[in-house]
Image: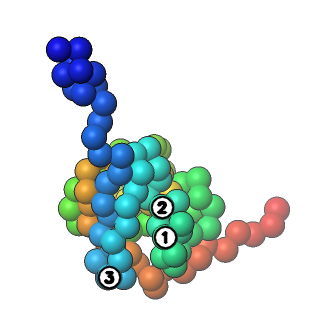
Amino acid sequence: MFENVLNFFIKKDKHFVANVVNANKTLKVRRGEKLLTAALENGIKWPHYCRVGSCGTCRCKLLEGKIRPLTDFGYVLGAEQLKEGYILACQSILKSEIKVELNFKQKRIRRTKI
């Protein structure tokens, strides 16, 4: 009886699958791991710069599935990008299996020295 209760609280899957459609890559993302971290660990050349959600370089389009944003994407992404389904990979935790489209043509934001 107690085993059934324990199994209810233990999550069977320790990872989700992310399919990067235009890179022909599928990767496992551990629960609680950021999408960008998993992608880089799996050898995907994902554009990125800051890794903290302030530059927007790692943005990608979420085609299917659900994520949990760690920050408000509206601080970095425009209203049109949010409407189109763009997310920040460095600030996204998967809640389900997902499909994303990576934008390889993104330009890195240049920082000016103050």
Q: Residue at x 52, y 60 (%)?
A: 37
| Disc with the residue nearer the chain's start (2 vs 3) | 3
Q: Which residue is mark 2?
A: 38
Side of 111 where 114 appears, left or right: right
Camera-side residue: 22 or 88? 22
Q: Are marks 2 and 1 in contact (CB under 8 Å)?
A: yes
Q: How many residues crowd mark 1 within 10 Å: few (<14), some (14–19), many (20+)?
A: some
- Give residue 87's quadrant in the image: bottom left
Q: Position of residue 60 (x, y in %)?
A: 38, 68
Q: Residue at x 37, y 67 (%)?
A: 27
Q: How many residues crowd mark 2 within 10 Å: few (<14), some (14–19), many (20+)?
A: some
Q: Position of residue 9 (x, y in %)?
A: 28, 25
Q: Which residue is mark 1?
A: 42
Indicate whether 72 appears above or below 106.
above
SS assignment at label 3:
loop
Instruction: Give, as a three-letter code, the residue at label 3.
Output: Asn
Instruction: Give, as a three-letter code, the residue at label 1.
Output: Asn
| Disc with the residue nearer the chain's start (1 vs 3) | 3
SS assignment at label 2:
helix
Q: Which residue is mark 3?
A: 24
Indicate whether 2 appears above or below 32.
above
